Amino acid sequence: MGWIPCSGRSHSKAKTKKKKNKMELQEKPLDRIEPTSGKLKPSSSLDAKEASKSGGSDQISAQTFAFRELIAATRNFRADSFLGEGGFGRVYKGRLENTGQAVAIKQLDRNGLQGNREFLVEVLMLSLLHHSNLVNLIGYCADGDQRLLVYEYMALGSLEDHLHDLPPGKKRLDWNTRMKIAAGAAKGLEYLHNKASPPVIYRDLKCSNILLGEGYHPKLSDFGLAKLGPVGDNTHVSTRVMGTYGYCAPEYAMTGQLTLKSDVYSFGVVLLEIITGRKAIDSSKAPGEQNLVAWARPLFTDRSKISQMADPLLQGQYPSRGLYQALAIAAMCVQEQPHLRPVVADVVTGLTYLAAQKYDANTHRVQSSSQAPFSPLRTKNSDKKLNGGR
């Protein structure tokens, strides 16, 4: 769960092998979790009434593990079990002795800046929310001062691993796979926004938090920064500005007012990364090209330059109309004004259509498996942006 203030500077490398910059939440700390409690009760951030609305109960039913069980699962956290490192701490691959199930185990860095609050939020959220595009939390360990999270193992790592800084010989993502990942990630976000009650604002959507299973099936992970969304007549929730530099919506970074549209902006940045192969922030680029959104905005309105936005690793193997339509969705998601951004349900509709248009790189033809025509997302100033290929 690596994160930094949205308004700060990023010095972190994209790969999870390096620890990312982060800042401590300046909020009242949570009480310690007693390891003998068996089940966690929702905290003030997710009370029993809200839990029941989300399909949970007044207690959290995530499985509890003794620390010795996770020592055995990771063979004492051996170096060859190490998968990566983020803001939360180190991640190891393990295998549960009683079931033989392969798992990913995150161990909280006790010297780090993320602590009990993010640990508890993660357990609460993933215990109460279940969807095929959200990572499955198997359980947790709160044994003494140890804090560990146990997830299903995602064999293909993160989306970031497949987009940026690819080692020689690593397979590139083709167009069809990219659209499948984008559509699946959007469906996970749609579940949080529209199916969860009250809605959940993810707040840390980025490529490293989209994990890939067999067949490149995407799942959102790392919910330590998630917040319950506004309810009733409220239009936003006010909170300390946290997230990852380059992905934060501008209005949230400036005011601390968090809405569902803040997540839509972050998704737009991720979609741009998927299409272009560029990083959200890349200090190795020339001035003016280091911020992905700032680089892309002037190109959105110039149709003659649309092909320049495609990831060079695609080697021209993509449908021209599909590229144009995908960029139309991304352009609308990263609008500066939140009311001009689409709701995530409309994003899902557009990307599901594009994912159904299977591009054959050998014939350069698109075979549709969907009868529904593509309907460009509409906003009040849609005449100023890409418009679904029209």
Image (cartoon, helix red, strand yellow):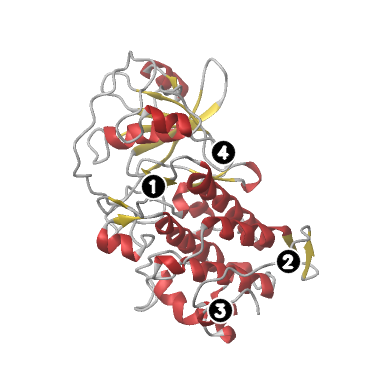
Question: What residue do we see at 23% from left, 48% from top?
Answer: 23
Which of the 4 image quarters holds residue 47? top left
Residue 35: x, y in percent?
A: 32, 17
Q: Earlier in the sequence, mark 3 or mark 4?
A: 4
Q: Nearer the N terminus, badge 4 or badge 2?
A: 4
**In this rendering, the label closer to the viewer, 3 or 2:** 2
- Residue that numbered label 2 is attached to: 373
Separation of marks 4 and 1 at Cα, in angstroms: 25 Å
Indicate the amino acid at tag 3: Gln
Label 2, label 1: how many angstroms apart (C-alpha)? 35 Å
Q: Give me the disc on residue 308.
A: 3
Going from N to C along the chain, the mark reached first, 2 or 1, is 1
Number of the front mark, 2 or 1: 1
User: Which of the two marks, 4 or 2, is nearer to us in this view?
Assistant: 2
SS at circle 4: loop
Label 1 belongs to which residue? 232
- Which residue appears farthest toward the front when viewing the image? 233
Q: Report the Cα–Cα distance between label 3 and label 4.
A: 36 Å
Residue at figure coordinates x 29%, y 58% from the top left: 6
> Which residue has dot 4 on it?
131
Element assignment for label 1? loop
Q: CA distance from mark 4 to mark 2?
A: 27 Å
Q: In the shown orientation, is residue 145 left or right of residue 132? A: left
Looking at the image, tell me whether mark 1 or mark 3 is earlier in sequence order: 1
